[in-house]
Amino acid sequence: MNAAAEALRLGPGLLLTDARAACPTLLIRPAEPEADARALESLALWCTRWSPKVAVDGPDGLVLDVLGCAHLWGGEEGLLASLAAAFAKLGLEQRAALADRRLAARAWARFGPGGILPDRRALDPFPVEALELDGETSASLRRLGLRAIGDLRRLPRAALARRFGLALAIRLAVLEGAEEPPFVPLVEPTRFSARIAWAEPIATHAGIEAVCSRLARDLCRMLERAGQGARRLALGLHRVDGVVARLEIRTARPSRDPGHLFRLFRHRLDGLELGFGVELAILDAVEAVELPAEQPELTAAVDARAAAILIDRLSARLGADRVLRPEPVASHVPERRVRWCPAGVEPRASAWTGSPLRPLRLLERPLPVRALALVPDGPPLKLEGSIAGRVVAASGPERILPEWWRAMDAAVRPRDFFRVRLEDGRELWCAREGLWGEPEPPVWRVLGSFS
C-alpha cells in the first residue's frame, strides 16, 4: 500500500469490484512473486554501495549492517539521506530506520516514522505485531488486553515465557539490548576490495575497461602488501537504474598481476548491457590465498605459470565449463575412476594409479559385440558385431564387482574383463556382463582400446 492507495481507502484483502468502485481508473496486473523476489535480490546487491553486508528481509524489506560504514557518508544522518536520495532517483518509495538491533529497526520502519531510533522506549506505544510474533500469539495477547509493547515490558518475563513461549521473551530481551543471531548476508564481504564512484555515469565500454584496469591495479597493490593472490574475483557494475551487472572470473593459479586479471575481465565485458550508465564499480577478491614472492626466471615455475595464464584466457573466452582437465577418483569401477573438472579449479591432492591391463582412455559409449568362447567363462575366440575379428591372444579375466553401497548399482551385474588382440593388430578391452546360469545370458561389450 502506498499513500495514494491509502487516500482512496484501499487495503489488502479488498474485493476487486469494491476497489474499482473507489478507483475506476485502477490498473490490474497479475502478481509475479518470483519476479518480485529476483528484483528485491538485485536491489540488495545494488545496496552494497552503502555496506558490504546486505540481506533480504521478507518479501519487501532489506537489512544492512552499517557498523563501521556510517562515517563514510558523514554520519548516520548522512547515510540515511544518501539512501533516500538514491531510492528516490530510482522512483522507489522506501522507509529506512536505523537502530542497534535489527528487530528494533524493522519495528521503527514498519510501524513508526523511520529514521534513527531515539530511544528503545520509543517502541512502547507500538502494537504487539511489531515483535513479529505468530498470529495466534498476537491474538492471544490482544484478548488479554496486552495490545502494546509497553504493556508487555511491565509484566514479569518468566510469566510471559510460561504463558506464551520463549519467542516472546527473547524478542523483548532483544529490544532491551540482548544479542541477536547473526544474519547471513546475500554476498559475503571480502577482505580485499576496490571501488570507484563517479558524479556522472559512464555509458561506454571503453570507459568501463579503463575503470576495470584501474581497479585491478588498486586491488593487486592490496594483495601484494598482504602477500596474497586472488583465485576468484567479482566485478560489480552498479547502473543508475538500480541493476547490478556482476561478472566473476577464476584463475588457475593465485595471481596478483593486474594486466592478467584485466584481460580476463575484458573478454567478459564485450556485449555487456550498460543501460543508462554505470555510477559505481566494485572489484572484490572473493577468494584469496597466500602467494609469496618468487623469482620465476631461475626456476621451472615459468612453464607452470604460462600454462595457468593460458587456461585463464581460454576459460574467460570459451567458458569455464569448456576448458576441462581429468582428475582421479577413488573408485574401482573403470567408468568412475576419472572425472572432468574445470581446468582453473585447484586440483585435489590425489595420485594417478595405472595398470598395464587397462587402457588409458575408454570409449565414450561401450560397443556391444557378440563373442564366441571355447568354454562359457573363458576368453573370447572371435568377436562379431560392431567390432569383428578373430582373437589371436587374450589375458584375463579380471572380475570387477559393482559398488554395492550405491543405490544406482543395485541392479548392475558383475563383469569379467579381458584384454584381447585381434588378428589385425588391434588390442581391445572387453567385458562380459553377467554370469552363466542367471535368467539372462551374459552380454559382451568393448570398453576401450590399447592401440
Image (tube, grey):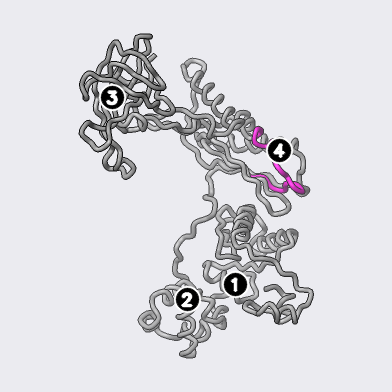
Q: Earlier in the sequence, mark 2 or mark 3?
A: 2
Instruction: Name the residue beneath numbered marker 1.
Output: 117
Image position, residue 372 (x, y; %): 28, 20
- Of the two numbered discs 3 and 4 on the same chain, state the one appearing first in sequence: 4
- Whether 404 is among the magenta residues is no
Instruction: Specify whether residue 253 is in view.
Output: no
Check disc 4 and give the amino acid type.
Gly
Q: Residue at x 59, y 59 (%)?
A: 34
The residue under label 2 is which amino acid type? Answer: Asp
Q: Which residues are magenta?
A: 266-282
Q: Are marks 2 and 3 in contact (CB under 8 Å)?
A: no
Q: Alpha carbon of mark 2 to alpha carbon of mark 1: how far?
A: 24 Å
| Quarter holding residue 386 | top left
Nearer to us of marks 3 and 1 is: 3
Determine the CA span between mark 4 and mark 2. 48 Å
Which residue appears at 59% of the width and 73% of the height? Answer: 108
Name the mark on residue 134.
2
- The answer to whether residue 83 shows anywhere in this view is yes
User: Which-is-in-front pick, marks 2 and 3?
Assistant: 3
Asked whether the beta carbons under mark 4 and mark 2 sit within 8 Å of each other, the answer is no
N-term mark: 4 or 2: 2
- Residue receiving disc 3: 417
